[in-house]
């Protein structure tokens, strides 16, 4: 029978995504057929699954770790926040609609059947399924109708390992407190715990492990050290941007303004991995660095709202000064839309504001439309004459005089636009910097050298290194025995 085990955290951002990805690669390296599964994910970092449709970028990464094509059934419910209290709801890869927080709580029980169907599909093709929870099972105010943590675990009969993050402090209290607050039916699903992100001499925490086991009756599956190779993996959501320090501090600077609803920001990972490049993420209230060679405007889940905030931060003036100095600008997806003269949303697809002026760096206009393009793509750079790959996830149609100079052709159709002087370009293609030849050509135009290598190889090597660390520090055989 297929084994399965679920990893739930004492809170958000305890490292569950990297943990599951590392274990996916570990078991795949042992010759097992592995599948990742996350019942519900909330993130604007999305990917296009190989069978079509959207999933969380984290599950795409975990599929890569398993060395298997990504499927929409690995993440059957994806929530994409586009306002303070509302999100798009993607079910088994397809956009189902939008809901505010309270409305979604009422909708969750209806989604459980589809979640269980997707889980059974994963079980049918695997030796083991590694399930990732979301948030914390201790959020008992959200327990009714839950599909992300204990609601799923109890419905599917999947045993649970609780993950605590020692780096943020209070790990003993968080694990013991979770034990205390869970109802008995949920508590009975937990087989043990593990500690993540430990720095220093692990023997110093022996008494801590004993204390947790004494108060909870749970066994320890081990203590994972701080995994430096995790920095080479795409982050699951924008929480990670608060801790990112990218680049070597030498060579050229690429500035990235961080909008409130930033999406697919791992587009910047290949640039940050380059030796001669420093990527500076500019937060609200900060100014764009005056010495930047280029500014990259990333994707956005709410283009108009983020464009308004862009101007409130004074970044529009910073970019005008940047281009006046001869600087380059690139816009990806929502960032491309912002580069134009105007963005319209007549149907209110992204919010209540129906129109706003753009940055005016490209002579194009965008109209939001209900049809959503979701596909993996092969492309050709019209500027540099190289082939590349990526993916599209976007609403909106963009056109105008500058589109006569497309940035790319995708499947033979033109995409994006380039300014007359060649220093500004926009495209709907995510992942374009992953392709070594394109990245090298663009960086060379900025006066920087590039390795020109495929960034996927860096991610793959990081997964192997993380798997090796897990073999050394976790009781893998005990985890397999605990898997139901």
Image: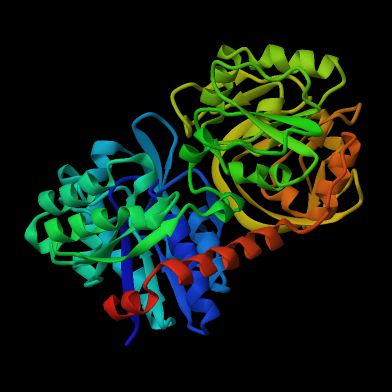
Picture coordinates of residue 274, whole percent (x, y): 76, 45
Q: Quadrant of the N terminus?
A: bottom left
Residue 436 visible at all: yes
Where on the picture, by quarter, is residue 466?
A: bottom right
Q: Furthest-bottom residue in view?
A: 1
At horizontal 36% and vertical 40% (from top left) the residue drawn is 168
Picture coordinates of residue 233, whole percent (x, y): 58, 53
At horizontal 55% and vertical 46% (from top left) the residue drawn is 371
At horizontal 83% and vertical 49% (from top left) the residue drawn is 438
Residue nearest the viewer, comparing 253 with 171: 171
Picture coordinates of residue 358, whole percent (x, y): 66, 20
Q: Furthest-left residue in view?
A: 184
Please say if 355 is above or below 475.
above
Please say if 150 is above or below 322.
below
Q: Say whether residue 167 is left or right of residue 187.
A: right
Q: Say whether residue 435 is left or right of residue 120.
A: right
Residue nearest the viewer, comparing 452 with 394: 452
At horizontal 56% and vertical 12% (from top left) the residue drawn is 312
Q: Quadrant of the C terminus?
A: bottom left
Way the structure is coloured: rainbow
Picture coordinates of residue 251, whole percent (x, y): 81, 34
């Amino acid at each position: 029978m297929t084994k399965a085990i679920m990893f739930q955290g004492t809170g958000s951002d305890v490292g569950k995504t990297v943990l599951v990805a590392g274990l996916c690669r570990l078991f795949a390296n042992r010759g097992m057929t592995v599948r990742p599964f996350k019942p519900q994910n909330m993130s604007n970092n999305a990917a296009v699954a190989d069978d079509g449709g959207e999933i969380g970028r984290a599950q795409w990464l975990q599929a890569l770790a398993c060395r298997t094509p990504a499927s929409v059934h690995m993440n059957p419910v994806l929530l994409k926040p586009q306002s303070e209290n509302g999100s798009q709801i993607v079910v088994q890869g397809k956009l189902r609609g939008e809901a505010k927080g309270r409305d979604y709580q009422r909708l969750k029980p209806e989604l459980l059947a589809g979640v269980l169907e997707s889980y059974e599909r994963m079980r049918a093709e695997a030796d083991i399924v590694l399930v990732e929870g979301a948030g914390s099972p201790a959020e008992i105010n959200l327990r009714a109708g839950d599909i992300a943590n204990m609601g799923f675990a109890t419905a599917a009969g999947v045993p649970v390992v609780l993950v605590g993050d020692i780096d943020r402090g209070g790990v003993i209290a968080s694990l013991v407190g979770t034990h205390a607050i869970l109802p008995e039916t949920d508590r009975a699903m937990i087989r043990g715990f593990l500690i993540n992100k430990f720095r220093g001499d692990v023997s110093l925490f022996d008494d801590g492990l004993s204390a947790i086991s004494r108060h909870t009756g749970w066994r320890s599956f081990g203590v994972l050290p701080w995994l430096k190779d995790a920095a080479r993996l795409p982050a699951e959501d924008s929480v990670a941007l608060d801790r990112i320090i990218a680049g070597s501090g030498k060579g050229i600077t690429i500035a990235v303004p961080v909008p409130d609803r930033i999406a697919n920001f791992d587009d910047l990972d290949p640039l940050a991995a380059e030796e001669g490049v420093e990527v500076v993420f500019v937060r609200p209230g900060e100014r764009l660095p005056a010495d930047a060679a280029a500014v990259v405007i990333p994707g956005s889940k709410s283009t108009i709202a983020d464009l308004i905030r862009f101007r409130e931060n004074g970044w529009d003036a910073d970019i005008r000064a940047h281009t006046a100095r001869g600087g380059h600008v690139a816009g990806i997806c929502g960032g491309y839309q912002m580069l134009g003269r105007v963005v319209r949303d007549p149907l209110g697809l992204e919010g209540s504001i129906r129109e706003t002026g753009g940055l005016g760096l490209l002579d194009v206009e965008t109209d939001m439309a209900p049809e959503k393009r979701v596909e993996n793509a092969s492309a050709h750079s019209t500027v540099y004459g190289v082939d590349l790959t990526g993916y599209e996830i976007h609403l909106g149609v963009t056109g105008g005089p500058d589109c006569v100079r497309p940035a790319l052709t995708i499947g033979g159709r033109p995409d994006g636009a380039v300014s007359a002087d060649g220093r500004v370009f926009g495209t709907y293609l995510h992942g374009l910097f992953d392709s070594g030849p394109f990245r090298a050509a663009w960086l060379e135009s900025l006066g920087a050298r590039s390795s020109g290598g495929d960034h996927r190889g860096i991610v793959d090597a990081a997964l192997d290194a993380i798997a090796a660390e897990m073999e050394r520090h976790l009781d893998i055989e005990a985890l397999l025995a605990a898997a139901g």
